[in-house]
Image (tube, rainbow, N blue to C red):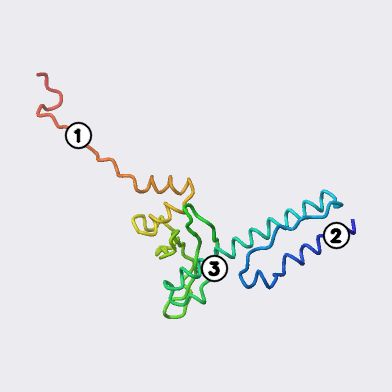
Amino acid sequence: MVRATLLLLLLAAAACTRTDQEANGAAPQRPVTPPADLSALEIKSFAIYDGQRKATQEQEQLLGATKKAMASILFDPFSAHYQKLRAGRNGAICGEVNGKNRMGAYIGFKDFVIPRDRSTAHISEAAGGFTGELYSAFTSAYIASCANQQEVRLYNILTAPTPVATPPVEDDVPAGSDI
C-alpha cells in the first residue's frame, strides 16, 4: 500500500513538471514503460498518466495553432482567453475566444472556427453561437467543421424553406345552390 501511494505521488509530481526538451518544443518523449514487478493498479496508474500526458500535449498544440491563427484577427491577441478548444473535422480547430475590443473591455466568449489551412478564423458575431446568424460565413464553417449531429439537425430545421401555402380555390358557385 505504501509502495502504491508513493508511486502515485511520484506520478502526480512528474505530471506537473515539464522537461527542458518539452519546453523548447522538441519531440515528445517515449511513453513511460512500467517495470515488470508492479501490481495491476500500479500499471494502470502508469497508463492513466501516459494518456493524460498525451492529452495535455494535444491541447498545447491546439492552443499554439489557435494563438498563431488569431494573432492577425484580434485587436489585442496577447490578452485573449480561450476555452473549449477541440479538434474539429477536416483538421479544423473549434473553440471559444474572449478578446478585448478597442476600448480595452472584454467582449465575452464567442465561438470560433479555424479551418485546416489556418489562413483565417471565423468568429461568431452573435452571442448565441450559430443560431443567431444562420446565413453567415461563420455558420457555414461551423456546420462544416465543428457541429455535432444535433446541431446539424437544428441548422437544417432552421434553414429549411417554409412551405408555401396555396390559397384556397374559390368556386364561382355560391354555397348551398343546386346546380
- Nearer the observer, disc 2 or disc 3? 3
Q: Is residue 95 left or right of residue 10?
A: left
86 relative position to 28: left or right: left
Residue at the extreme bottom = 103
In three-dimensional space, the C-alpha distance between marks 1 and 2, rounded to whole angstroms, equals 80 Å
Nearer-N-terminus badge (1/2): 2
Q: Verify CB contact (< 8 Å) between mark 1 and mark 2.
A: no
Name the residue type under label 3. Gly
Q: Residue at x 12, y 27 (%)?
A: 174
Q: Position of residue 57 (x, y in %)?
A: 62, 62
Point out the image quarter for the N terminus. Answer: bottom right
Q: Which of these two is toward me, 49 or 75?
A: 49
**Residue tagged 1:** 168
Percent across and percent down for residue 125 are 39, 64
Q: Which residue is mark 3?
A: 64
Which comes sooner in the sequence, label 2 or label 3?
A: 2
* Residue type at the position of mark 1: Pro
* Label 1 element class: loop
